[in-house]
Image (cartoon, helix red, strand yellow):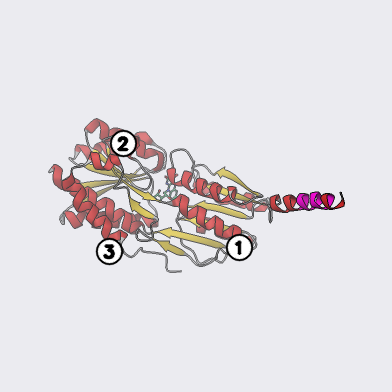
Amino acid sequence: MRSSRFALVFALLLAGFLTTPVFAATIGVFIPGALQGSPTYELLDAGVRKAAAEVPGITVKTIEGGFNQAQWGEQIAALVASGEYKWIVTSNPAMPEICTPVAQAYPAQRFIILESWSKNASFATLSYNHRELAFLHGALAGLLTQSRKGAAVAGLVAGQEYPDMNNAILPGFREGFQSILPAGKVEFRVVGNWYDAGKGAELAKNLFDQNVSVVLPIAGGAGQGVISAAKQAGKSVLWYDTDGYALEKGIVVGSGVIRQDTASYQLVKKALAGTLEYGKPLVVGVKEGYLDYLTSLPAFVSGLPAAIRTPFEAIVNQFRTGKKTLAMPLPTS
Ligand code: RBF
């Protein structure tokens, strides 16, 4: 009788111990823009949520900052001032600078900032080698343009200009294109925001009218306009960093991927385990597996002839195995 009562008490205590969180905390995911139309931000959020779901007591709140970049600093400051968030997780190369004054005012606050590079001791940052992924897009654009016998010109339509765009993505795309067509040119167009599909379509139509065969949009929701213009003109689109084949079958003929969900999952898991290092920026490229080209999906295989796919896969494999790497230009401080 007595021993069974002990057993019951013991069982209850054990159950309580197993289900009680080690600690309770809320993670704030700050989206600098909108989730809808920006798969890179959806992946960021998904990775954080997956990591949090694996640890009892952890809550995630996602806050969309909207497209007025001048407001992001104040919004972050308000989140931090609330004292509610043990970590603020966000992503894009502009965020370290925007978060710096807030980090100075609140030295205990920790930030996890993806797609960025900083030695600030309050930040854990991870940046992607955009030059490598852009090179692959450029090489595929070159092979495609060569086969179509169009003008030796490829298009890149960006949402806005920023250092990684100007110093890594655009030069990488050009290097890749010229690795196939040495005299080839890249026409660069800027939408001016990350949502205007009408402007995206207009810029792309103008390029297609000049006999450009393929355009790479990196423009958030405005990329949808580039796809509709390509459909109308019977031209091709490459999709930069998430599986874009299903967006328009036969039009999106190549897709890269940046595994931002894996990256945010891993960083948040480390943060929750207390092993995340701050102030030591990480850089990952194709050989580390965070950037890749989706060459095995049926849409890629059926969308392009083997005469394009075979040489392209050989180039991708050089990066996958680390036989070929490109240095990612990074800030010096
Ligand atoms: N990419 C998007 O898809 N949607 C956005 O709203 C968006 N906003 C950005 C704002 C700034 C200030 C910067 C520097 C980049 C932004 N990007 C956006 C680009 C994104 O961070 C990334 O570079 C591209 O998705 C290529 O991987």
Q: Which mark is residue 274?
A: 1
- Alpha carbon separation for disc pair 1 and 2: 44 Å
Q: Which residue is more in the foreground, 88 or 14?
A: 14
Gap in angstroms between the C-alphas marked 3 and 2: 31 Å
Q: Mark 2 and ligand 1: say if the CB distance to the nearest ligand atom is below 8 Å.
A: no
Check disc 3 and report the residue beneath it.
Answer: 324
Answer few, some or many: residues within 10 Å of disc 2's Cα (few below 14, many 20 plus, some between 14 and 19): many
Quick one: label 3, few (<14), some, or many (20+) residues within 10 Å?
some
Q: Residue at x 46, y 60 (%)?
A: 126
Q: Which residue range is magenta in the image?
A: 5-13
Task: Report which residue position mark 2 lands on.
Answer: 227
In the image, taking residue 286 as reference, residue 183 lies left or right, namely left
The number of numbered discs placed on residues in the rendered structure image is 3
269 lies above or below 50: below
In the picture, measured across the screen, residue 209 lies left or right of residue 271, that is left
> Is the residue at mark 1 in contact range of ligand 1, meaning its CB lies under 8 Å from it?
no
Furthest residue to the front? 1
Residue 140, above or below 131: above
